[in-house]
Amino acid sequence: MTQSLKKTQTRLRVNAVIVIILVILLTVTSLFFYKHVDNQWRDYSNTASNVYVLHDTLVQRLGYGGFIHHFKNLILRKNVDLYLPSIKKEIYEIKVILEKLEAVENYDKQALGGVRTTLANYEEKLDLALKMIEQGASSEAIDDIVKVDDAKALAALSDFESHVNTMLKKKSVAINENFKFAYTVHILTIVLLAGILLFYFKKLSTSYKEQQALTDQALEGARIKSEFLANMSHEIRTPLNGIMGLLQILQPNVQKPQNIEIVSKALFSCRSLLTIINDILDFSKMEANELTIENVNFSLIKIVESINSDFLPICNEKSIELNIDIDKNVENIWIGDPVRIRQIILNLVSNAVKFTEQGGIQVIVKKKVKNLIPGIELQVLDTGIGMSEEGLANLFQRFQQADNSITRRFGGTGLGMSITTNLIKRMGGTIDVDSKLGEGTRSTIFLPLEIAEQQQIIESPHITDVPNLEGKTVLIAEDNPLNTMVIQSLMAETNANVQFAKDGLEAIDLFKKINPMLVLMDIQMPKMGGIEACAHIRALNPTTPVIALTANVMKENIIEYKNCGFYCHVGKPVEKHLLFEALNNAISQHSQNLSD
């Protein structure tokens, strides 16, 4: 991860934390004021309710329907027993009401002064009226003496009511102001959140577009890289085909033992170069995530035993042993990718042989259940130079070997183990390597494979005899002069009548004239390529086998050629035995088509 990207991520995290804290603070502030408004509203409601109830009660007790009314009747009728109890009760209740009103929070106690003064005046006059009634004074005489100005009482009640309304109005205004503030904070929080979301959405959209552009760039780069490697592979294989072809032609005609060894080693070097090219192509596919794993029935025993025949000549030359030990309870037919499994074993044994000068190599195959998953375990043990701990740490790194001095001493690209590990992981398997410097190496691989239900594969026998094409015509489309010479020399052993075309158009015209038994077709040619030429030939005669003879050897290429109508594929550099095998199979297929 680049320093710039780390800084960007840190800045985004800090900004996100600041925004979150700000939003939380605003939300808490808004909730606080809403809560405050709610409390004020409850207080306002309770105050208004209590004050108005008490006010109404006070008016009833003090007004003309209450104390004052009864006081007037007492003076007029002078019936003490009837009115005095009611008057005393109302005086008591008025005092209780006044105490309750004075207990109300934020209530101005002076607002009740006029009411208390009026009540006190009436209490004084009540005592005087009772004495005068007791003395037998007339109602008019009593009224003249104890008369109280009712206007003052009414004015006191009016002032009291006015004060109550003013107090409640102030509470209402305070509630409205706090509510407006809380509402404003709430709206600001929503606006801020919306703004932040919009900002980050734009940022996210921009980042997505940038990421998409980078992804497209990476995909384009991978495509260009893949095309480049494929083209380079084709260009390298074309001259290599000439070298290998000429060496294969030369090999049976060399008589001196020294020259036989030279040709053999030259062919070995060519095949080593092919292995390197294939490794680079495989690694490119893995990087582009284009490498696929097949699941077909295959013979595990046949694959393992083929390793013995591949490396036995080298082991004999180095005077080291190669032992294959397949456990007796290992079934023969399994389900998996035989090509890639063989490649895994081949890479491991190749390394073991390369780095072993004395002793030998042992390949052990047995069934294994790991984490409740059945499969096979492969062990490759050698008595070679071994590896240090640092070497083991670099073992699976691409373009690296355990020690840089190993490259100088033994050669290699450093891709083999990286590809092997990748293949094992793609199959869901594991690899463990134990090694000590100077004591050899043990590689243990577990592959989760299923045993096939049918333990027998019907295979057509591989015919590697030189095909007899005497009296038969073979059309070969090839534009490279050196490759033309090579294929002509290889085909000489078949005694076929070989006719050459330099491009696809010439091949079609020549096909019409000579009606060959089969066609060997290059793919990349001037004027018209092999795929288009094959389509025209198949349209003219669908029974004539057309074999793709090309340096394009990638799996997708081979599938494409078969889908386009080619009978089979022979890769360049051409291995003579593979060419003869393809010719024999094509002849057999052609004969069967004619009989049908």
Image (cartoon, grey):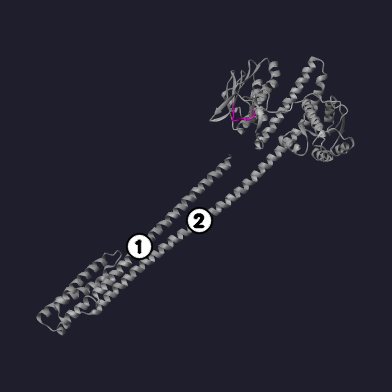
Q: Name the residue under label 2.
A: 192
- Residue at the (76%, 37%) spot, across then down: 561
Q: What residue appears at the point 48 percent right and 59 percent down from the top-left corner?
A: 187
Please name the amino acid that badge 1 sits on. Arg
Which quadrant holds the C terminus? top right
Q: In this view, does 578 lie to the left or right of 391?
A: right
Return the x and y of residue 327 as percentages of the image width and height.
60, 21
Distance CA(mark 2)–CA(mark 1):
31 Å
Please check the rendered image and state whether residue 431 is part of the magenta-colored stretch, yes or no: no
Question: Is residue 419 or residue 99 the one in the foreground?
Answer: 419
- Residue 379 percent location from the top left of the image: 60, 23
Task: Give the percent coordinates (x, y) of residue 226.
Answer: 70, 37
Q: Which mark is residue 42?
A: 1
Query: Residue 189, relative to residue 525: is it above or below?
Result: below
Callout 1 crowding tier (Cα within 10 Å): few <14, some 14–19, many ≥20 = few
> Observer-nearest residue: 7 or 505?
505
The structure residue drawn at horizontal position 71% and vertical position 30%, both measured from the top left corner, is 277
Q: Quick check: can you spot residue 337?
A: no
Q: Quarter holding the N terminus?
A: top right
The region drawn magenta spans 445-454
- Label 1 SS: helix
